[in-house]
Image (cartoon, grey):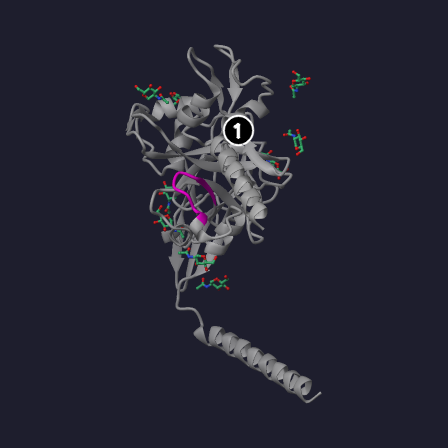
Amino acid sequence: MKMGIQATWLLLLTLGFLSAITPTAAQSFKCSSPTPCTSIVDYVSPNATTISAIKTLFGIKNLRSLLGANNLPLSTPATQPVAAKQKIKITFPCFCTNGTGISNKRPLYKVVPDDTLYHIAAEVFSGLVTYPQIQAVNNISDANNIEIGQELWIPLPCSCDEVDGEKVVHYGHVVDAGSTVEGIAQQYNTTEDTLLKLNGLASPNDLKAAAVLDVPLKACTSIVSTSSMDYPLLVPNGTYIFTANNCVRCNCDAANNMVLHCEPSHINSSSWQSCPSMQCQGADNLYLGNSTVSTCNRTTCGYAGYLNNQTILANAVVESTCSVRESSATKFSTQAWRWNFLLIFVQLVLFSLHLSL
Ligand SMILES: *[C@@H]1O[C@H](CO)[C@@H](O)[C@H](O)[C@H]1NC(C)=O
Ligand SMILES: *[C@@H]1O[C@H](CO)[C@@H](O)[C@H](O)[C@H]1NC(C)=O
Ligand SMILES: *[C@@H]1O[C@H](CO)[C@@H](O)[C@H](O)[C@H]1NC(C)=O
Ligand SMILES: *[C@@H]1O[C@H](CO)[C@@H](O)[C@H](O)[C@H]1NC(C)=O
Ligand SMILES: *[C@@H]1O[C@H](CO)[C@@H](O)[C@H](O)[C@H]1NC(C)=O
Ligand SMILES: *[C@@H]1O[C@H](CO)[C@@H](O)[C@H](O)[C@H]1NC(C)=O
Ligand SMILES: *[C@@H]1O[C@H](CO)[C@@H](O)[C@H](O)[C@H]1NC(C)=O
Ligand SMILES: *[C@@H]1O[C@H](CO)[C@@H](O)[C@H](O)[C@H]1NC(C)=O
Ligand SMILES: *[C@@H]1O[C@H](CO)[C@@H](O)[C@H](O)[C@H]1NC(C)=O
């Protein structure tokens, strides 16, 4: 008995010691989708920096994609200061490998004098990755042997999986001290259960400050066609993006019923000589982003995607603006109640049968 207790203590101590020196692999997100996607992660710079320096660090091509992910005005200069510890959202390409998601060959970090893998992981990239993760994807056999000028792929955590059968954008949320799973769930309109399950947490008490939590962001609904080059266009709440070779700008705002709103961007196309006409199919007098209101109907010209042959698809979407026919909704819920009642009744009958047997 005594021996058993001592052995248990020894085991616990050893385990505690191991977990103290082994960097947690907690920031690996489950990912098994065969299709790559776009993900978001929070970057908390340890030092005061600028938008431009962050753009370079993460190898982001266009300033506007960084501004869009953070819902900053398009006029924000690259020199805009970022305070130490300020959170900046980074958008990056993601793919699944071996059951976890990692950023797709990006960012690439060039080793400078006095760097160590630990410093790069824990400080430069603020603990979004661990040094063994950098070591593994870069096939480095000796962590103490990296060369100045060597380019390292930093595998940011991400996922491309659907959540509860819904396409979402996975957001690596850096947990603030004092926040709760319930609070985070509420803020991003998901459930505590979903967050716990997604992050392999047994209880809400297991949430740790500074951990990177996988939060599924709902994207705005859109009418983008499956044949479009940017299908499925997933724009999460509180962000904007440019698509159709930069010709179209789309915003997602929960205040707009989570319906994607797109309009001509008025910036030069990245690939086409000029941006094509964005006239609406089904409402020739309208162009992308326009809407008209007639009795009880609002017709909006919505973005439906783009094709490589310099075509932008725009389709009319009609919404009813008058008060919805409440009677049918009421009828439906009454019917649902009747069904529930019937089921309860059947169960009661079965239950009493069971008792009498
Ligand atoms: C995938 O996991 C297996 C076993 O867990 C491991 O042997 C292999 O090296 C991993 N592959 C990659 C690319 O990480
Ligand atoms: C932050 O500043 C300190 C002191 O100036 C410096 O040692 C450290 O390398 C900086 N960290 C980064 C990520 O630039
Ligand atoms: C990793 O390195 C080992 C030995 O250095 C080599 O045999 C292997 O091909 C490398 N793998 C990749 C993916 O570069
Ligand atoms: C949408 O984003 C706003 C601002 O970023 C936030 O206040 C709101 O809670 C979010 N709503 C949903 C449903 O995610
Ligand atoms: C939050 O999500 C639920 C279910 O997915 C949805 O019905 C509700 O409208 C959403 N709330 C907001 C503010 O988007
Ligand atoms: C856009 O293109 C026009 C001509 O095609 C050019 O004059 C203008 O400078 C370009 N604007 C930007 C911001 O590149
Ligand atoms: C339609 O949208 C274009 C460009 O966004 C705008 O210039 C035009 O005034 C709009 N027309 C109507 C009828 O709203
Ligand atoms: C409103 O749209 C519906 C179809 O969505 C159409 O049947 C109806 O005629 C429209 N009403 C008006 C006033 O335009
Ligand atoms: C582009 O391709 C689509 C479908 O393949 C076709 O319907 C359309 O006419 C083409 N447009 C142009 C400008 O070639």
Residue at 47 percent across and 57 percent down: it is 318
Q: Residue at the front extreme? A: 2
Q: Which residues are magenta?
A: 206-214
Residue 314 within the segment the image draws in magenta: no
Secondary structure beneath dot 1 equals: loop
Front residue of this view, candidates 250 and 160? 160
Q: Give the quadrant of the C terminus.
A: bottom right
Q: Residue at the right extreme? A: 357
Image location (x, y in percent) of residue 250: 43, 41
Q: Give the quadrant of ligand 1.
A: top right
Front residue of this view, candidates 354 and 244? 354
Residue at 54 percent across and 40 percent down: it is 10
Q: Is residue 43 left or right of residue 198?
A: left
Name which residue type carries label 1. Pro
Image location (x, y in percent) of residue 6: 54, 44
Crowd around label 1: few <14 · some 14–19 · many ≥20 (10 Å): many
The residue wearing badge 1 is 155
Say whether residue 150 is visible. yes
Image location (x, y in percent) of residue 261: 42, 46
Residue 308: quarter of image: top right
Look at the picture and state if 148 lies above or below 307.
Answer: above
